[in-house]
Image (cartoon, rainbow, N blue to C red):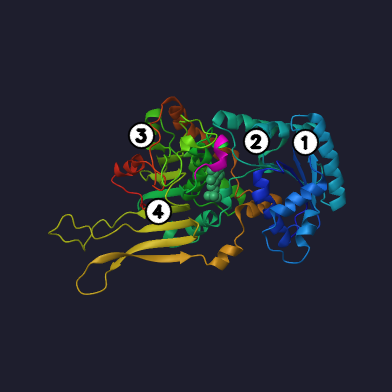
Amino acid sequence: ATENKAVITLFGATGDLAKRKLYTALFKLYQKGYLQDHFALLGTSRHEYSDEEFQEVVRQSIKDVEETRTGEAQDFSKHFFYKSHDVTKPEHYTILKKRIEELDKQFGTEGNRLFYMSMAPQFFGTIAMNLKKQGLLSDDGFNRLVIEKPFGRDFDSAKKLNDELSETFNENQIFRIDHYLGKEMVQNIQALRFGNTIIESLWNNRYIDNIQVTLSEKLGVEERAGYYDHSGALRDMVQNHIMQIVAQLAMEQPVSFTDTDVRVEKIKALRSLRVYTPSEAAANFVRGQYDAGDGTEAYRSADGVDPESGTETFVAAKLMFDNYRWSGVPFYVRTGKKLADKFTRIDVVFKKPLIDIFADPRNESDQSLNSNVLTIFVEPKSGFAMQLNAKRAGQGFTTQPVDLKYLQSDTDKKESPEPYERLFHDALEGNHTNFASWAEIAYAWKFVDVIRKLWDIEKPQFPNYTPGSMGPAASDELLARDGRKWVYRL
Ligand code: BG6
């Protein structure tokens, strides 16, 4: 492995994400040699910690990762330092600056600086501005900004944030995290499509009937209610994760597999996504909120949720792309909390043969052939399945659906890095392939804003689905109206 050299400054160093994901990701990079002697992390947040206390926080966070040699976690934690910090006070940045410069010298990081924002989004702009004003950027190595979602609440606030960041960082220096882009099988969409003639040659409106994307969660909002009640599923999952997946399914083949070329195609795809008028949006979006059931409480009864909350915990929608490849092919998407199970999958439903020669001509309702369906299992199992029609064994002639299937082995899965490990490494390498560009985010917000505005005005009839189901009945009706069904249903 090639060593990455940098001082990482982490805003939100004692936060939940840092403790749950970021330190583990860095430790794994350290174990694999992507980080060696020449890195340091300067953590900051409002809390007071000494360097030693902070190092203990880091060791606690990585305690479940097996060491590859004794003393490894201890050695790793010695690269971590801490300064408490009030992000609104300019003079505090001068303290950080001094500390970063010292660490740069001490660890020989060649002026490379990575700033990671993992805290309340209202401060992202202020921090970026101060990084420049107080001179925290280096002149010799790289300066990069990694920024967590949410990236805005709507197009206007996202644009404002982006304008603020752009005062300090250019687009090539900004890495907007969407952890779904760090998932093995989401990255595999491109391998599957652009590495296989039999897939890509059929990947258009002549052969595909519809595409379905499901991000299903079993848990409710748990202790994140405070955030979630102001966000809702549309902002929390659709604007970012679902849009990024859909862009990869819809995009044209990039000229090369580099971040610049991939980005161009994703932007073009999102640009051809039909932005609905308010009445079209009302017809093509479904929202839901879970009720009590299965021995668990209703969303509205959760701690931190407004008892009359109109926040949606479920969204289903029909998306249309107005371009040559996809004209007429609906992309149905859905996501929700407290559904039947935790999984992410993509179902690509192909058109049936134009003539079914196996059907009984005397019986009009005889429909023996099924649609071919290509399923991409993203999580928890990872792999693909292709449903084909085959002859049922035995006398006579009837057909039945059979599956060609590839699932990653447990060893493969164990070797696949977690999203945050991958994305951290990409950012250290300066590779943008698995990050969202501003233009993609802007198009996604413009699409989502129409329905958000409508939903903010019209009072919903909530709650409208039971825990353990696949959402409200209207989600099934959205497809039934088009003579279709969700491939995954209970
Ligand atoms: C996050 C959302 O972005 O993604 C959460 O804020 C959601 O609400 C999570 O639970 C799902 O991610 P994953 O990787 O567990 O599917």
Q: Which of marks 4 and 3 is in front?
A: 3
Residue type at mark 4: give it: Val
Badge 4 local density, few (<14 within 10 Å), some, or many (20+)?
many
Position of the N terminus, as image quadrant, is bottom right
Q: Is 221 a magenta residue?
A: yes
Secondary structure at numbered mark 1: loop
Q: Where residue 50 sits: x, y (%)?
A: 82, 44
Residue at image mark 1: 85
Instruction: Give yes or no for contact between labels 2 and 4 (Cβ–Cβ under 8 Å).
Output: no
Q: Is residue 396 above or below residue 319?
A: below
Counting residues from the N terminus, which is met first, the one under dot 4 or under dot 3? 3
Please say whether residue 201 is visible from this viewpoint.
no
Counting residues from the N terminus, which is met first, the one under dot 3 or under dot 1? 1
Horizontally, residue 77 falls left or right of residue 412, namely right
Secondary structure at numbered mark 3: helix
Instruction: Give yes or no for contact between labels 2 and 3 (Cβ–Cβ under 8 Å).
Output: no
Residue at image mark 3: 283
Kindly report the distance in space between the C-alpha atoms of the residues bearing marks 4 and 3.
23 Å
Kindly report the distance in space between the C-alpha atoms of the residues bearing marks 2 and 3.
34 Å
Horizontally, residue 1 falls left or right of residue 304, namely right
Residue at image mark 2: 120
Horizontally, residue 330 falls left or right of residue 72, namely left
Kindly report the distance in space between the C-alpha atoms of the residues bearing marks 4 and 1.
49 Å
Residue type at mark 3: give it: Ala
Q: Where residue 134 sits: x, y (%)?
A: 81, 33
Q: What stretch is highlighted in magenta?
A: 220-226
Counting residues from the N terminus, which is met first, the one under dot 1 or under dot 2? 1
Counting residues from the N terminus, which is met first, the one under dot 4 or under dot 1? 1
Residue at image mark 4: 348
Kindly report the distance in space between the C-alpha atoms of the residues bearing marks 3 and 1.
48 Å
Q: Of 208 and 156, which appears nearest the observer?
A: 156
